[in-house]
Amino acid sequence: MAAYPVRAIVLRKTKLGETDIILTLIAADGRQIRAVAKGMRKPGSRFGGRLEPFAEVDLLVHEGRSLDVVTEAESVESCASLREDYDRSTAASVVADVADKLSADSDAEERLFGLTRATLRAMAACDVEALQRLVCGFLVKAMALHGVRPELDSCAACAAHAEGGNSFSVGSGGVLCPTCGERDPAALPFTEAGRSLLVSLLGMTMEEIANTSVPENDAREAFGLLRGFVAYHVPARLKALDFYAGMGM
Ligand SMILES: [Zn+2]
């Protein structure tokens, strides 16, 4: 069997049989890998706690007939606080869920790995009140990498200058001018503060986002809009995002 080394982040664990786990991972080149960690649920497993969700690891993986098998694992960054704290864990789960669905696409986007890593590391270390804007920053950047960057300057429906536009269409993919906004009953309310927040999130690194302060109302508006935007453009059900939204975001 051929073996390959890979740097990856654990996105999800799925039970297999009595003692094994199937890991869903995003590799450093943006591809998704699914591989079995044998005996991981046995006490004293040789993998220890290294293969938990949100951890970044260096793996040696053997190609199997149906599923590949992890034979060695070294911790790069465990991000333990993401599993120990409820608020961090629910926010990080949104990141893992979206990275899982987007990396499953056969067109691997290498930058999705870097974005996922930077977001999880920022979430592991930030003040708890920064989690909300990190989720927003991750969602808008992940969608941009996925090829659906929200249009925030000119009208997403008619390309006219969107000055004075106060609505957003998830289907058209951005802000609407006042005329198109009036014609679209499904458009969401969109304030100038929400617009400038999305523009600045797109322009900042995750670390910068962690250290900027944003009024809670603006972050809530941006989240509601991004949630609709992601749900429209990513066909899979995103349970972690639904759960996070249900927490009163
Ligand atoms: Zn228009």
Image: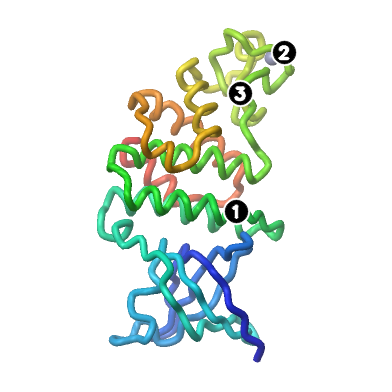
- For the N terminus, the quadrant is bottom right
At mark 2, the secondary structure is: loop
Identify residue type, mark 3.
Answer: Leu
Q: Is the residue at mark 2 in contact range of ligand 1, meaning its CB lies under 8 Å from it?
A: yes
Identify residue type, mark 2.
Answer: Ala
Q: Whole-percent x and y of residue 148?
A: 65, 38
Rendered image: mark on residue 36: none
Q: CA distance from mark 2 to mark 1?
A: 31 Å
Q: Which residue is mark 2?
A: 160
Identify residue type, mark 1.
Answer: Leu
Locate residue 60 relative to residue 223 in the image: left or right: right
Q: Which residue is mark 1?
A: 102
Q: Which residue is mark 3?
A: 152
Q: Residues within 10 Å of mark 2 (few under 14, many from 20)?
A: some
Please, is residue 49 above or below residue 28 in the view? below
Please, is residue 107 above or below residue 56 in the view? above
Task: Compare marks 2 and 1 and give the one earlier in the sequence.
Answer: 1
